[in-house]
């Protein structure tokens, strides 16, 4: 082997980790975006100021979730010298990166090194992971713990019996319980039960289900006791019933997001974009036939493990009345372990074919990837009505990748068409992460305007507001350090912040209030700062 070949191979082996690192770091240079990010960041800030078991928002109990996520972000706030958007976002980014690393190791051990990297790259470039991995949310950290649990269970079922693996399994499930309640534990439990019932693996007893349930019951009781000891019966009821039972059967108000039963049948394909063709290929009946030799134990097929686990988890998520796209995060790594293996097997077979041209399925996938790569810069051009340097640069990068994919596909260069397809997916994801803060930060980030409000008000005073919602209760304390109080009929504070959602319900202030500053955040939210005129002051 020549020196040039060795250098090329070394550079090629560095490309996958560099691509994953790039996708992890891009898009972090933005403020807190509504609706979820301000809430999670502010709860964590208050947790850093006053550590407790029960989280608070604007000084009031907010016990939708257990405290572990908020403890984690609060600890980072303290280590880094105070609350910041970057520190809050770092937890989600780190959890997503760790999940990708697990998928690389898992796929490599289950099949091959190429499968490990392929699964991770496909997951990193799918729409739902791409968005959620850079969002200040609980779900990326939950995804990390459920992926760890699923991986440990697979190792026990497929490879070896180990006390350390059982400890990893049980510990990951306990962390999931303390991060987001029972949902993480129940998802993994449903997935394992579904897999064991269908495939009947020989070593399922290695999971020690009775011991696992006993440990989890103890962890659940300790969490419930801690909540009850600090907040009493009301806090325990709110956490145990409202945020578990009511979310499952009949969410109302802020307790959940009611969606129809088949909600994930159309949201899941969108979440998996641009990898719909690998999903269709993996669902072919020929991939579900089992190979078993007489007299030997039934082997654990990692692709079937990922597929059956994710199917059972999706059924459970669909049964709940509360549904959101972000709830798919714990399922995605298992889906892409399955898709990574099946895509690699299909690609290996595809390269051996001697057809003069490529199939219609390949061209459909190439079309999806071309649209995925070009959509963001073209949309940005239309949005801005005139291209800027960012738009032109990203459009050129996307166009170059698309041109390479089309050229290698037209000339049927199969060995190069596959990497060109992945390059399109990476380029499209990188372009989205690059352009999103440039285009949307002005509309989604209320931070600079809220800071200016805090600077205008006299020091030491709370912020009196009209139209208070969860967003204002988070944004104002996080950026100003002041609490938010509602304006009542008996109050005439010197300064009032009013939120107008343009729904016809905005209150009219007395004529002696003068508007000092105003800022619109999209078509449905405007913030206004009003000042009470002094007696005799000219309007």
Image (cartoon, rainbow, N blue to C red):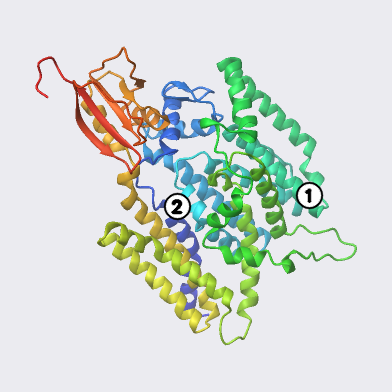
Could you tell me which residue is drawn at 60 percent across and 65 percent down?
Answer: 278
Q: Secondary structure at mark 1?
A: helix
Residue 249 is left or right of residue 99, and the answer is: right
Could you tell me which residue is drawn at 45 percent across and 69 percent down?
Answer: 370
Instruction: Name the residue carrying label 1.
Output: 196
Compared with residue 90, is residue 435 higher up or lower down, i.e. above or below? below
Residue 512 percent location from the top left of the image: 18, 20
Crowd class of label 2 (few under 14; some 14 to 19; many from 20; radius 10 Å): many
Q: Secondary structure at mark 2?
A: helix
Residue 266 is left or right of residue 48, and the answer is: right
Q: Nearer the viewer, mark 1 or mark 2?
A: 1
- Residue farthest right in this picture: 295
Residue 71 is left or right of residue 289, and the answer is: left
Compared with residue 434, is residue 28 higher up or lower down, i.e. above or below? above
Residue 160 in sight:
no
Decide which of tag 1 and tag 2 comes sooner along the chain: 2
Could you tell me which residue is drawn at 60 percent across and 50 percent down?
Answer: 264
Instruction: Name the residue carrying label 2.
Output: 24
Residue 78 percent location from the top left of the image: 41, 30
Q: Quadrant of the C terminus?
A: top left
Crowd class of label 1 (few under 14; some 14 to 19; many from 20; radius 10 Å): some
Alpha carbon of mark 1 to alpha carbon of mark 2: how far? 35 Å
Residue 426 percent location from the top left of the image: 46, 63
Could you tell me which residue is drawn at 45 percent across and 80 percent down?
Answer: 407
Compared with residue 8, is residue 147 higher up or lower down, i.e. above or below? above
Which one is nearer the viewer's eye here, 294 or 533?
533
């Amino acid at each position: 082997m020549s020196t040039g070949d060795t250098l090329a191979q070394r550079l090629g082996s560095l490309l996958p980790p560099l691509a994953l690192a790039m996708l992890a770091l891009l898009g972090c240079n933005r403020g807190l975006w509504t609706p979820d990010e301000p809430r999670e960041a502010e709860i964590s800030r208050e947790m850093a100021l006053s550590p407790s078991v029960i989280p608070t928002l604007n000084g009031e109990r907010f016990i939708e979730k257990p405290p572990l996520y908020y403890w984690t972000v609060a600890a980072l706030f303290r280590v880094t010298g105070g609350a910041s958007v970057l520190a809050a976002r770092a937890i989600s980014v780190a959890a997503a990166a760790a999940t990708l690393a697990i998928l690389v190791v898992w796929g490599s051990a289950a099949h091959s090194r190429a499968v490990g990297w392929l699964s991770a790259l496909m997951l990193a470039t799918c729409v739902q992971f791409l968005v959620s991995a850079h969002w200040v949310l609980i779900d990326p950290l939950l995804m990390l713990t459920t992926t760890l649990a699923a991986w440990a269970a697979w190792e026990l079922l497929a490879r070896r019996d180990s006390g350390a693996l059982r400890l990893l399994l049980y510990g990951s499930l306990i962390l999931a319980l303390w991060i987001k309640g029972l949902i993480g534990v129940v998802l993994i439990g449903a997935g394992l039960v579904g897999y064991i019932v269908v495939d009947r693996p020989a070593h399922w007893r290695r999971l020690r289900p009775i011991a696992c349930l006993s440990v989890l019951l103890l962890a659940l009781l300790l969490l419930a006791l801690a909540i009850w000891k600090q907040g009493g019966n009301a806090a325990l009821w709110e956490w145990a019933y409202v945020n578990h039972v009511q979310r499952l059967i009949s969410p109302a108000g802020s307790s959940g997001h009611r969606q129809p039963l088949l909600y994930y049948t159309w949201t899941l394909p969108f979440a998996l974009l641009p990898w719909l063709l690998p999903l269709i290929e993996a669902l072919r009946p020929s991939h579900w036939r089992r190979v078993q030799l007489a007299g030997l134990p039934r082997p654990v097929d990692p692709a079937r493990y990922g597929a059956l686990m994710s199917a059972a988890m999706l059924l459970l998520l669909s049964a709940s009345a509360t549904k959101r796209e972000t709830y798919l995060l714990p399922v995605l790594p298992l889906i892409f372990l399955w898709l990574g293996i099946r895509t690699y097997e299909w690609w290996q077979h595809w390269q051996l074919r001697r057809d003069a041209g490529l199939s219609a399925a390949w061209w459909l996938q190439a079309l999806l990837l071309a649209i995925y790569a070009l959509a963001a810069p073209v949309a940005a051009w239309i949005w801005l009505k005139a291209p800027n340097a960012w738009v032109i640069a990203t459009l050129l990068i996307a166009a170059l990748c698309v041109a390479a994919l089309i050229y290698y596909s037209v000339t049927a260069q199969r060995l190069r068409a596959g990497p060109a397809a992945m390059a399109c997916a990476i380029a499209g994801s990188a372009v989205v992460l690059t352009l999103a803060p440039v285009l949307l930060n002005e509309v989604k980030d209320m931070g600079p305007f809220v800071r200016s409000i805090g600077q205008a008000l006299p020091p030491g005073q709370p912020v009196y507001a009209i139209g208070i919602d969860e967003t204002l209760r988070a944004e104002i304390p996080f950026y100003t350090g002041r609490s938010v109080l509602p304006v009542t009929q008996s109050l005439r504070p010197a300064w009032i912040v009013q939120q107008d959602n343009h729904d016809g319900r905005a209150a009219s202030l007395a004529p002696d209030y003068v508007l000092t500053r105003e800022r619109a955040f999209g078509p449905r939210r405007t913030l206004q700062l009003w000042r009470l005129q002094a007696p005799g002051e000219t309007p």
